Image (cartoon, rainbow, N blue to C red):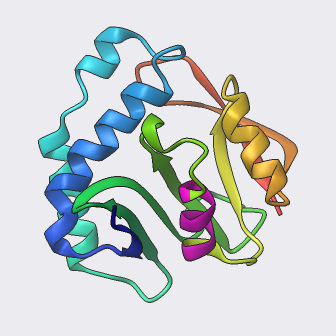
Amino acid sequence: MSRDIREATTLDATALGYLHVECWREAYAHLLSPQFLDGLDPVARGEGWARQLSRPRPDERVFVLEVDGELRGFASSGRAHDEDPPRDRALYTLYVLATEYGSGAGQQLLDAVLGDDPAYLWVADENPRATAFYRRNGFILDGVSKEGPRSERLLELRMVR
């Protein structure tokens, strides 16, 4: 079995779109409505990844987990976009397929996009697995929350290190 954590390229965009949607469906099935999850468009998500990867910014990092030629996880980080951010750097995404839970891939991806840099992230309130993972990596809840995504009532909590 070949396992590789590597920087994403524009050639990954389509697969990233499908992976992104599948990871959301697995991770948030208990938090988001089936209608919302069914409405996620992997093609549109892939087009978004294509745009992002075709215009790389020096402050952004996007890495993928590839297992035997198939993408099974990804992470991205970069300059903070929130108003009044607690850190200059933000973790934008970190997802692996459920088949990769416990494999160490999430840790490898986090290390690839953040290392030990001070940063912040948003995590779903009712996602104890993710919250515990981030705590093990030095992040703490800072008491700030927001609602998202757009059509769902999902509470996101901010974690900072």
Q: Quadrant of residue 70?
A: bottom left
Left or right of 56? Residue 150 is right
Residue ID at (70%, 27%): 125
On the image, the x and y values in percent for residue 92 come to: 52, 57
Residue at the outermost top position = 34
On the image, the x and y values in percent for residue 108 come to: 58, 67
Q: Is residue 137 above or below residue 38?
A: below
Give the residues drawn in magenta, as a range: 105-112
Examine the structure image and report whether residue 144 is included in the region drawn in magenta.
Answer: no
Residue ID at (42%, 27%): 26
On the image, the x and y values in percent for residue 89 come to: 65, 72
Q: What type of secondary structure mainly makes up the magenta span?
A: helix
Quadrant assignment for the C terminus: bottom right
- Front residue of this view, candidates 67 and 73: 67
Residue ID at (74%, 39%): 131
Left or right of 118? Residue 29 is left
Q: Is residue 49 above or below residue 126?
A: below
Q: Is residue 114 above or below residue 36?
A: below
Quadrant assignment for the N terminus: bottom left
- Front residue of this view, candidates 137 and 55: 137
